[in-house]
Image (spheres, rainbow, N blue to C red):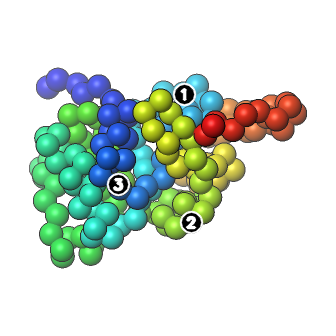
Amino acid sequence: MMKTVQDDQALLSRLQAQQVEFVIIGGFCAIMHGVSLVTRDLEVCCRFTPANLRRIEAAVKELHLFHRLAANKLPLELTDELCGRLKNLYLQTDLGKLDCLGEIKGVGGYEDALGRSVFFKLSYGKFRILNVDTLIAAKEAVGREHDLAAVKQLRAIKEKLTHEAPRPNPTD
């Protein structure tokens, strides 16, 4: 089986093009804050309404996607009934892994994540990411070894930034 290369830029661009409501969380968010660890998926917290779930589906439907945690690798086939039951989506696509979460441990749901996010500008778009304090809280709540390693770096980054002169806003 051929290994898929993770292409977060392409996945984010597709989500943005479909106007999916989401906040970047997890490892990629940590990288945006300056953490030097590697991530193997793209995690977003999103609104789990039928309309937003359909926008996610439209963004990735042609990428040979399937539910990566299902034993039989089921394709994503949304129905109104299924949209009402979903809490998370763990997808494998031709562009890599995309985890869409309705709730973040230690933070709350989409509205909580949105309220505790900041804009971050990349060469291919402007995105909402968890602020550093919220990301620290989320990673501590999960408590896995690699999350706690990221927390150490995030705390060091935060400490360094509080002692430096003000920097330009990354969204400028």
Quote the CA–CA distance across marks 2 and 3. 19 Å
Question: Callout 2: 10 Å neighbours few (<14), some, many (20+)?
Answer: some
Q: Is residue 27 visible?
A: no
The image quadrant where one finds the C terminus is top right
**In the figure, is residue 155 to the left or right of 170?**
right
| Residue displayed at 22% across by 46% down | 60
170 sits left or right of 164 in the view: left
In-front residue for pair 96/150 = 96
Judge depth for marks 3 and 1 and give the one in front: 3
Q: CA distance from mark 1 to mark 2?
A: 26 Å
Q: CA distance from mark 3 to mark 1?
A: 29 Å
- In the image, what residue type sits under mark 1? Leu
- Reading the image, the residue beneath label 3 is 19
Q: Report helix, strand or loop for mark 1.
A: loop
User: Earlier along the polypeptide chain: callout 2 or callout 3?
Assistant: 3
Q: Residue under circle 2?
A: 112
Residue picked out by circle 1: 37
Q: Residues within 10 Å of mark 3 (few under 14, many from 20)?
A: few
* Residue 8 in sight from this viewpoint: yes
Name the residue: 35% across, 54% down.
Answer: 19
